[in-house]
């Protein structure tokens, strides 16, 4: 079995484990779906209240997709890998002939599959229930941002495992950071009613760029939403995360650092 | 050195400025079950983790299968198997899924179901790991250690925390490995375990080798003797027994006991005396010397001396040979 096949097998194995883990499944797949339904249920028809030029669902569907990418790519991966490290599972893997990258690639591939499936479900609900319109430019932007956004978030999630000594720390940091960024990136509160300074703060972080890019793809006729600045921001954060990960990733429980 | 599975010379390791291993030396032959004994904190795990390639050493020479673990790569990892002391298994996978995934990491894995059967889990192969008992999980650990068909298997305290039945099951499993010709490096703090399983034993104390040899050699060299205990009638005191057997007699409630280097002679004298005086000794127990006795003595001894072969910090490799004489 060559290493690429092995990485594929590792990803399938990780995916199987993920699907049997109710907590991870609820927080990364079920919760975004609930957010979409609840937010649309509360604010349906009140887009003028938020000074939006598009129907509420057209704003919130891509916003929740970006948030889901962050939950699955960043928060869930951070918690999963920190837990496996704390339990000595990574140490055991490190003692086998398996190359390190195979494990990391398996985790990232598994995350991309989870994100892809969830995005399809979210879009289907948006289109089927809330009359969001999908065109070629939307799908293009969605595909590009989902892939690049997930890669970026995975790299940052893996990088953050270095500063989370324990599962408890990761389980607090992942969702908390996601929530804070959600509020300052125009995910929960629409950008037009946000104070400028807060939006500017949000622009420093990757979620804002992911959310805005996706919102353009959904809300602006004929636009893929792909802009150099948003892609560059995601790529820069992803590259930074990957560098930190490659330089500092630990395989042993925190006691042994 | 080529027929040495493991060879360690003058191994030193410090943590935070404190030296934990004071230049220990030992070697393990191919096909041998090697018992590495010590209390918690003696340096067992530090040593095994250096051998496994997890820790860097400060100085000394280490060779496992002819390779320095600190520089070993994938080929070397294909030839060793690890059963770590603290490494959990993901509870959501079945036994077969877990062992099968690990088998994919190795170049020449053994058959997954055969490996599961060999550790006695054939009937649990489809069960999720989370539903297994502690002893069964430890067997999965061993299956993972074996599935790459390793030449050397490291077992770091495989029975710690197991109940007595599970421990005996693990012993049978390790005895099976010996029959199969595997080289096994076993750490434990159970004397009984090393005594039963290991061809040769090294006792580590405070980062130095306190004694080494076969279990029998260790017991004998340290001057330990057969222990004889019995319940005597109330009018018989330790002093009278001592006069008969010529040894110091300890009393523990109604129980009397002494150690003998000539068990047959002393026992005969004791029984004849009881017979002639017309009283009965109840619950007579004759126990051969155990490694436990050796170990308690070594562990409680003054590290600067009084042990048979060398808390010698220079770690002379020949220092493993017990020279005899109780401290």
Image: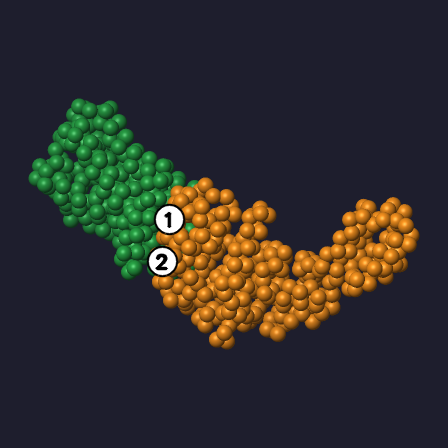
Residue sitting at x 8%, y 39%? A222
Comparing A203 with A156, the one in front is A156
The numbered mark at residue B281 is none
Comparing B307 with B164, the one in front is B164
Q: State the CA–CA distance, disc 2 to disc 1.
A: 13 Å
Residue sticking out furthest to the bottom:
B1
* Residue placed under numbered mark 1 in the picture: B97
Residue sitting at x 70%, y 68%? B221
Where's residue A50, x and y in %? 19, 28
The verdict on a common chain for dots 2 and 1 is yes
**Does the residue at mark 2 contact the one at mark 1 (Cβ under 8 Å)?**
no
Q: Is residue B290 left or right of residue A225?
A: right
Q: Nearer the viewer, mark 2 or mark 1?
A: 1
Residue sticking out furthest to the left:
A222
Where's residue A241, x and y in %? 30, 52
Q: Secondary structure at mark 2?
A: loop
| Residue A121 in which image quadrant | top left
- Locate the N terminus of chain A by quadrant: bottom left
* Residue placed under numbered mark 2 in the picture: B105
Rendered position, B27 above or below A133 = below
Q: Which mark is first along the chain, 1 or 2? A: 1
Where's residue B325, x and y in %? 74, 68
Q: Colour of chain B?
A: orange
Residue sitting at x 24%, y 52%? A236
Q: Chain of mark 1?
A: B
| Residue A191 in which image quadrant | top left
| Residue B268 in which image quadrant | bottom right
Residue sitting at x 44%, y 58%? B146
Q: Colour of chain A?
A: green
Where's residue B182, x and y in %? 49, 64
């Amino acid at each position: 079995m060559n290493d690429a096949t092995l990485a594929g097998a590792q990803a399938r194995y990780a995916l199987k484990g993920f699907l049997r883990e109710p907590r991870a499944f609820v927080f990364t797949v079920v919760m975004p779906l609930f957010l979409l339904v609840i937010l649309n249920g509360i604010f349906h028809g009140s887009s003028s209240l938020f000074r939006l030029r598009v129907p509420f669902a057209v704003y919130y569907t891509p916003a929740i997709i970006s948030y889901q990418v962050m939950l699955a790519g960043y928060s869930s991966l951070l918690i999963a890998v920190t837990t496996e490290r704390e339990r000595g599972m990574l140490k055991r893997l490190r003692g086998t002939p398996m190359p390190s990258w195979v494990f990391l690639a398996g985790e990232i591939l598994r995350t991309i599959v989870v994100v892809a499936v969830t995005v399809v479900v979210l879009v289907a609900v948006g289109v089927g229930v809330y009359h969001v319109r999908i065109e070629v430019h939307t799908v293009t932007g969605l595909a590009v941002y989902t892939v690049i956004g997930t890669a970026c978030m995975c790299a940052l999630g893996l990088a953050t495992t270095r500063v989370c000594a324990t599962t408890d720390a990761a389980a607090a940091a992942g969702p908390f950071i996601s929530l804070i960024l959600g509020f300052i990136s125009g995910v929960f509160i629409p950008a037009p009613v946000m104070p400028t300074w807060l939006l500017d703060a949000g622009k420093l972080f990757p979620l804002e760029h992911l959310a805005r890019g996706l919102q353009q793809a959904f809300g602006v006729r004929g636009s893929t939403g792909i802009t150099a600045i948003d892609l560059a921001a995601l790529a820069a954060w992803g590259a930074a995360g990957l560098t930190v990960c490659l330089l500092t990733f630990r395989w042993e429980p925190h006691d042994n650092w | 050195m080529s027929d040495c599975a493991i060879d360690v010379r003058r191994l030193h390791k410090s943590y935070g400025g404190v030296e934990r291993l004071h230049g220990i030396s030992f070697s393990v032959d191919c096909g041998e079950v090697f018992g590495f004994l010590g209390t918690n904190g003696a340096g067992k795990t530090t040593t095994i983790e250096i051998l496994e390639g997890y820790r860097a050493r400060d100085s000394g020479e280490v060779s496992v299968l002819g390779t320095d673990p600190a520089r070993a790569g994938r080929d070397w990892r294909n030839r060793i198997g690890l059963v770590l002391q603290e490494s959990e298994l993901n509870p959501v996978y079945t036994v077969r899924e877990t062992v099968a995934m690990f088998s994919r990491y190795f170049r020449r894995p053994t058959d997954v179901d055969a490996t599961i059967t060999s550790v006695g889990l054939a009937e649990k192969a489809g069960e999720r790991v989370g539903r297994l008992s502690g002893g069964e999980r430890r067997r999965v650990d061993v299956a993972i250690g074996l599935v790459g068909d390793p030449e050397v298997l490291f077992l770091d305290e495989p029975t710690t925390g197991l109940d007595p039945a599970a421990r005996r099951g693990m012993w049978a499993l390790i005895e099976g490995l010996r029959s199969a010709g595997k080289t096994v490096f076993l750490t434990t703090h159970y004397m009984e375990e090393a005594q039963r399983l290991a061809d040769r034993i090294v006792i580590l104390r405070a980062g130095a080798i306190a004694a080494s040899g076969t279990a029998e050699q260790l017991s004998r060299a340290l001057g330990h003797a057969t222990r004889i205990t019995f319940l005597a009638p109330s009018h018989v005191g330790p002093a009278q027994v001592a006069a008969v057997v010529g040894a110091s007699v300890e009393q523990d409630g109604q129980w009397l006991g002494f150690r003998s280097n000539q068990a047959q002679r002393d026992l005969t004298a004791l029984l004849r005396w009881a017979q002639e005086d017309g009283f009965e000794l109840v619950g007579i127990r004759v126990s051969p010397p155990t490694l436990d006795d050796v170990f308690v003595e070594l562990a409680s001894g003054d590290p600067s001396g009084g042990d048979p072969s060398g808390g010698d910090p220079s770690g002379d490799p020949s220092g493993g040979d017990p020279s005899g004489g109780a401290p």
